[in-house]
Image (cartoon, grey):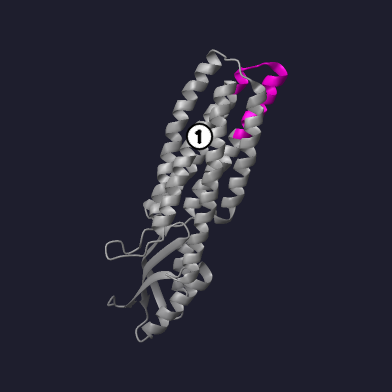
Amino acid sequence: MGEDHVHHESRDLRPLTGAIALTATIFAAELLGGWWSGSLALIADATHMAVDLLGLGLGLFAAILARRPADPKRTYGYRRVEVLAALGNAVALMVATGFILREAWARWTFPTPVAAGPMLAVACLGLVCNLGSAALLWSGRKNINLRAALLHVLSDAAGSFGAILAALLILATRWYEADALVSALICFGIVLTAFWLLRDSVHILLEGAPAHLDIEEIREALAALDGVREVHDLHLWSVTQGQESMSAHVVVEPGRDSAQVLKDGRALLAERFGLTHTTLQVETEAGGA
């Protein structure tokens, strides 16, 4: 593991720890504010924050564990723990949504008075802290673990914004159902966040090809190399987001220098597609390795 890689992973820990501190502050403020004001929207967002704290803590644990080097039992190392953390976050978000929606329906059916002033103050604090967390995590958004954390705090920011709107509406009209309505809308944002995380993490765990790479374009580029007749058994996957791997069999014309074909193929993959962890097996036209 190179020094730059270690420094990069150390930088990944700082935004996560900062986001955890801010999220813990918002969680405590919204939980107390929701209890004081009677606002379900604040309690819903606080519940979301509790799940986020668990998710961010899991993400921090995954980021620390991912720094461990490969060993004979785990030859790719521990980087895929980050993907498992993202998957766990997605499931936890969906579970939390069910509880919030049930309470939102009860509040819609039987509206409960809400102290809109304190609700507004706490929601504004939550929005500022969530935007601060998002700013900390933005630089690491290409990492699936940090992107999971970023989606968490962005959906939290949307929830805080919704709570602000609900508080303003209640202050102006005394329409208490707005609190339940905003809670349901917050749940919609949570479900979207969970779906994106679930989709991306399952795709990686199923060894799916990275979305930004076209496997047929790679096949055609390799086949166009001087002396290459055919490319088959091409596989492209991600260990974790941003760490792609590829393997392929390359059939060359008889008499061609296999070492040169390998050199040209690896240079092409690295320079054109950013693939540096590749395995190419050269075969003769007759099929022998």
Residue 46 can be seen, yes or no: yes
Task: Indicate whether 58 appears above or below 225.
Answer: above
Q: Is residue 96 left or right of residue 29?
A: left
Residue at position x 37%, y 81% from top? 253
The region drawn magenta spans 160-179
Quarter location, residue 167: top right
**Residue type for callout 1:** His
Please state, as top left, top right, bottom left or bottom right, where the C terminus lies in the image: bottom left
Left or right for 74, reference 33: left
Is 89 above or below relative to 162? below
State yes or no: residue 13 in magenta: no
Whether residue 204 is visible here, answered yes or no, is no
Which element carries disc 1, helix, strand or loop? Answer: helix
Q: Which residue is disc 1 drawn over?
A: 48
Residue depicted at x 51% and y 45%: 20
Q: Is residue 164 magenta?
A: yes
Closer to the camera, 1 or 266?
1
Give the image location of residue 37, x and y in percent. Answer: 60, 22
User: Which SS type dominates the magenta stretch?
Assistant: helix
- Find residue 239 and report its horizontal and vertical position in percent: 40, 59
Q: Residue at x 46, y 62 (%)?
A: 216
Front residue of 127 and 271 = 127
Q: Residue furthest top?
A: 110
Q: Tell me which corner region of the image, top left, top right, bottom left or bottom right, holds residue 64.
A: bottom left
Q: Is residue 1 above or below residue 188?
A: below
Badge 1: residue crowd in 10 Å (few <14, some 14–19, many ≥20): many
Determine the image quadrant of residue 165: top right
